[in-house]
Image (cartoon, rainbow, N blue to C red):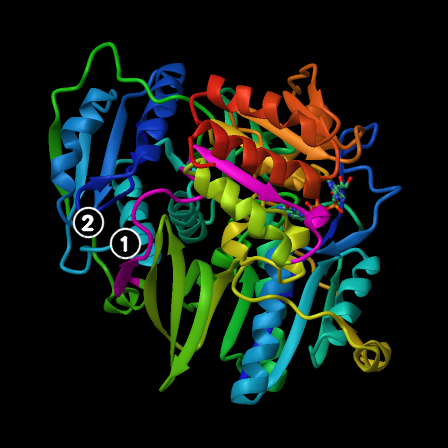
C-alpha cells in the first residue's frame, strides 16, 4: 500500500502563548517546534498500516525550510520518503495551502503511481482551519471523512471509525481514500537510536510550487482576555482535606 | 440574499449546537438585512422546521433524496452547495462541531470559496471583519473575508442559544439535489453507543491527574475519589503519552472539553493546550507542589502539596462525611 501523510510544523508553547509585535504570528523565538498532534498520530497510523499490510509511507509538509526537522522526525519513526513544499515563511491561507498540496500530490502520483491512502490531521493545532484535507480530497476526486480514530482494511475498502458522544460511527470507504485523523487513534512511538541515525540519510525532496491565495487575510493575532481570579489556598498538606470537603459540600457535589 | 443555516441532526434528533448556530445566524442575518433560512438534510428533517422557526428561521429547506438518510459529509456538502447556489445564498453557516466544520469545508471545496472555521464575532461590511479561534481557544485571529458566498462556522459554545422574539411560521420548502451515486461512499454505515450516562464531557466532577501522578497505578486513588463524588477521571497529554491512561481520558485541545461543576486538577501544570479543555469548568481546585504553576494561578482554589498525600486524605474525609468510614 502506498500511503501519504501530510503534516504541519507548529510551535509548542507552554503556560502562555505570545504574539509577535506586528501581530502576524506566534512569537516562537523561545519555543521548540513539533508536529501538530493529530498529524503525529496520522503518521504513526500510516507506519503501522505499512508494517501490517506492507507498503511505503511518504510524509509531506508545506512550510518554511526549517520544517525539514519534522520530516526527519517522521523518517526517524518510520516514514520512507519525505517531501517539502517550501514557503517563504509567511503563513499561507487554507485555499493556497490546499492548492499547492493537491498539485504536489498530482505530481508525485504522476511520477511514482497513485497513493492508496492519504492521511491528514483533522485540523492543525495552530490555525485550526478544518479544511485543507477536504479541499485536497475534493480536488483529487477522492472520498474523505474527518474525525477518524480507527482504520481497518478488507477487500479494498477502509472501514473507518469516528467518535461521537459516548460511542462511534463507522464509514466503509473504498480505496483510494483520504482521512482526517484525530489524536487517540494510536499512541505514537518514540524514535529509536537506529531510526534517528537512518533519518539523517533520508533525502528530502523539495517541490517548489506556487499557488494563489484565497479570500482570507490575517489582520492580527491576539490573546483572549483572561479572567484573573485570586486563588484561595486551602492548605499546604494533608490537613487541607477538611477545607476541600467543605468546598465540595458547598458546591453540592458531596 | 439569504443567510442559510445548516442544522445538524440524526434522523430528526437535533444537535443542541444547531440552536447556537440559529441564534448566531439570526444576528448575522439582521446585520445584513437578510432573511435567515434553515437547511435540514436527511431523514425526518421536516420535524425540525418548528425548532428552526422558533429560533428565527423564516423558512426551512428540507432536503430529501434516497441517499440522504444518515449523515455523510460529501452528500451533505454537495446537497447544501446545490441549494445555496439555487437560492443565491449570501452566506452559509453552521455550528463549529466536527460535522459542522466538515460540511462547510465540503461546501467550500465545491464552490472554491474561502471558509472561516470557529468564528467568535462576524461583522459584515466591505470586507467582512471576523474574529475566530486559533489554538483551540488560546489565541484569537482577526481576519478579513472577501468571497462570493461567505462560508463560516461559529465556535461551538461561543454563545448561549436563545429563541427569537418573533418566531417564524415553520413553513418548509422541499429541495431535491442531484447526487452522484458515488457519494454514498462516505455515508455512515453503522453507529454504536458505548457509554450511556455520565461521560467525561458531561460529568459534574472531573478528577484529573498529570505527570505529577507518576505512574498508571498512581491513578488508583484518583479513580476512588472520582467514584465517591459521582465523577470521572481525566488526565493531561503527558499522561496519555506515557501510556498511563487511554486518550479518551485526555482533557484539552486535542482531547475532551469538559465543563464540570468542579475540576480537581492534580499534578497538572496547566499548559495552554490543557487549559482550553478545562476552562469551561465552573470551579477549579488545583493540587500541585508548585505554587507558581499556571494551573494553580488560574484556579479558584488550590492546595499546595504533594498529591500523593493530599488525595488519600481527601478520600478519607469524604468517606467520613458520607458515613462510609
Ligand atoms: C499542539 C499541542 C496540543 C496539545 N494538546 C494537549 C491536550 O489536549 N491536553 C493536554 O493536557 N496537553 C496537551 N498538550 C501538551 C501540553 O503542552 C503539556 O505538555 C501537557 O499538558 C503537560 O502535562 P502535565 O501538566 O501533566 O505535565 P507537566 O507540565 O510536566 O506538569 C506536571 C505538574 O505536576 C506537578 N507535580 C509534580 N509532582 C507532583 C506531586 N507529587 N504532587 C503535586 N504536584 C506535582 C508539577 O509541579 C507540575 O506542575 C498539547 C501540546 C501541543 C504542542
Percent of width and height locating residue B177 = 20, 52
User: What secondary structure is found at the residue carrying circle 1?
Assistant: loop
Q: What distance separates the C-alpha of mark 2 from that of mark 1?
A: 7 Å
Residue A3 seen from this side: yes
The circle on residue B210 is: none
Where B68 sits versus B225, above or below? below
Work out whether residue A122 or residue B178 is closer to the camera in this orientation and state it.
A122
Work out whether residue A96 or residue A59 is closer to the camera in this orientation and state it.
A59
- Pinpoint the chain carrying mark 2: B
Q: Residue at x 54, y 67 (%)?
A: A119
Does residue B60 appear to the left or right of B81 in the view shown? left
Tell me whether marks 2 and 1 sit on the same chain. Answer: yes
The circle on residue B42 is: 2
Residue B130 seen from this side: no
Going by the picture, which residue comes out furthest to the bottom?
A54
Does residue A82 appear to the left or right of A179 in the view shown? right
Q: Residue at x 51, y 19 (%)?
A: B125
Which span is picked out in magenta?
Answer: B187-215
Q: Residue at x 39, y 21 (%)?
A: B160
Circle 2 crowding by C-alpha within 10 Å: few under 14, some 14–19, many from 20: many
Percent of width and height locating residue B65 = 15, 55
Cβ at disc 2 under 8 Å from ligand 1: no
Percent of width and height locating residue A5 = 61, 69
Q: Residue at x 58, y 78 (%)?
A: A48
Amino acid at each position: 500500500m502506498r500511503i501519504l501523510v501530510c503534516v504541519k510544523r507548529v510551535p509548542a508553547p507552554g503556560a502562555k502563548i505570545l504574539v509577535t509585535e506586528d501581530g502576524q504570528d506566534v512569537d516562537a523565538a523561545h519555543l521548540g517546534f513539533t508536529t501538530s498532534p493529530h498529524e503525529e498520530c496520522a503518521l504513526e497510523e500510516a507506519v503501522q498500516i505499512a508494517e501490517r499490510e506492507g507498503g511505503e509511507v511518504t510524509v509531506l509538509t508545506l512550510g518554511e525550510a526549517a520544517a525539514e526537522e519534522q520530516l526527519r522526525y517522521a523518517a526517524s519513526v518510520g516514514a520512507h520518503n519525505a517531501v517539502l513544499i517550501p514557503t517563504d515563511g509567511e503563513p499561507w491561507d487554507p485555499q493556497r495551502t490546499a492548492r499547492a498540496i493537491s498539485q504536489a500530490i498530482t505530481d508525485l502520483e504522476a511520477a511514482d503511481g497513485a497513493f492508496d491512502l492519504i492521511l491528514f490531521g483533522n485540523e492543525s493545532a495552530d490555525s485550526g482551519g478544518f479544511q485543507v484535507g477536504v479541499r485536497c480530497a475534493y480536488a483529487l476526486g477522492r472520498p474523505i471523512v474527518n474525525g477518524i480514530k480507527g482504520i481497518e482494511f478488507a477487500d479494498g475498502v477502509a472501514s473507518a471509525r469516528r467518535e461521537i458522544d459516548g460511542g462511534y460511527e463507522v464509514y466503509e470507504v473504498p480505496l483510494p481514500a483520504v482521512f482526517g485523523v484525530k489524536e487517540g487513534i494510536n499512541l505514537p512511538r518514540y524514535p529509536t537510536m537506529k531510526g534517528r541515525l537512518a533519518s539523517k540519510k533520508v533525502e528530502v525532496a523539495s517541490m517548489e510550487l506556487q499557488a494563489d491565495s484565497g479570500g482570507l487575510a490575517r489582520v492580527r493575532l491576539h490573546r483572549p482576555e483572561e479572567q484573573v481570579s485570586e486563588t484561595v489556598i486551602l492548605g499546604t498538606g494533608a490537613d487541607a482535606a477538611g477545607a476541600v470537603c467543605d468546598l465540595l459540600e458547598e458546591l453540592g457535589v458531596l | 440574499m439569504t443567510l442559510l443555516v445548516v442544522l445538524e441532526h440524526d434522523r430528526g434528533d437535533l444537535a443542541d449546537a444547531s440552536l447556537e448556530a440559529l441564534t448566531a445566524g439570526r444576528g448575522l442575518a439582521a446585520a445584513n438585512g437578510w432573511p435567515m433560512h434553515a437547511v435540514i438534510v436527511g431523514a425526518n428533517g421536516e420535524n425540525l422546521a418548528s425548532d428552526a422557526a422558533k429560533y428565527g428561521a423564516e423558512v426551512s429547506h428540507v432536503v430529501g433524496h434516497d441517499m440522504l438518510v444518515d449523515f455523510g459529509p460529501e452528500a451533505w456538502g454537495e446537497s447544501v452547495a446545490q441549494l445555496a447556489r439555487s437560492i443565491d445564498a449570501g452566506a452559509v453557516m453552521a455550528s463549529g462541531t466536527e460535522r459542522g466544520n466538515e460540511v462547510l469545508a465540503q461546501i467550500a471545496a465545491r464552490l472554491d470559496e474561502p471558509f472561516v472555521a470557529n468564528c467568535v464575532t462576524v461583522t459584515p461590511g466591505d470586507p467582512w471583519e471576523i474574529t475566530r479561534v486559533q489554538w483551540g481557544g488560546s489565541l484569537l485571529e482577526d481576519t478579513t473575508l472577501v468571497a462570493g458566498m461567505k462560508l463560516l462556522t461559529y465556535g461551538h459554545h461561543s454563545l448561549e442559544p436563545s429563541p427569537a422574539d418573533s418566531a417564524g411560521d415553520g413553513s418548509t420548502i422541499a429541495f431535491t439535489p442531484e447526487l452522484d451515486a458515488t457519494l454514498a461512499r462516505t455515508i455512515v454505515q453503522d453507529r454504536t453507543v458505548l457509554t450511556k450516562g455520565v461521560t467525561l464531557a458531561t460529568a459534574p466532577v472531573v478528577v484529573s491527574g498529570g505527570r505529577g501522578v507518576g505512574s498508571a497505578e498512581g491513578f488508583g486513588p484518583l479513580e476512588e475519589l472520582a467514584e465517591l463524588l459521582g465523577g470521572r477521571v481525566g488526565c493531561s497529554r503527558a499522561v496519555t503519552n506515557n501510556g498511563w491512561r487511554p486518550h479518551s481520558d485526555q482533557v484539552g485541545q486535542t482531547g475532551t472539553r469538559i465543563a464540570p461543576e468542579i475540576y480537581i486538577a492534580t499534578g497538572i501544570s496547566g499548559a495552554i493546550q490543557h487549559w482550553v479543555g478545562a476552562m469551561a469548568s465552573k470551579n477549579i481546585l488545583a493540587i500541585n507542589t508548585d505554587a507558581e504553576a499556571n494551573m494553580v494561578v488560574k484556579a479558584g482554589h488550590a492546595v499546595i502539596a504533594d498529591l500523593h498525600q493530599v488525595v488519600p486524605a481527601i478520600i478519607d474525609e469524604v468517606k467520613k462525611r458520607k458515613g462510609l468510614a
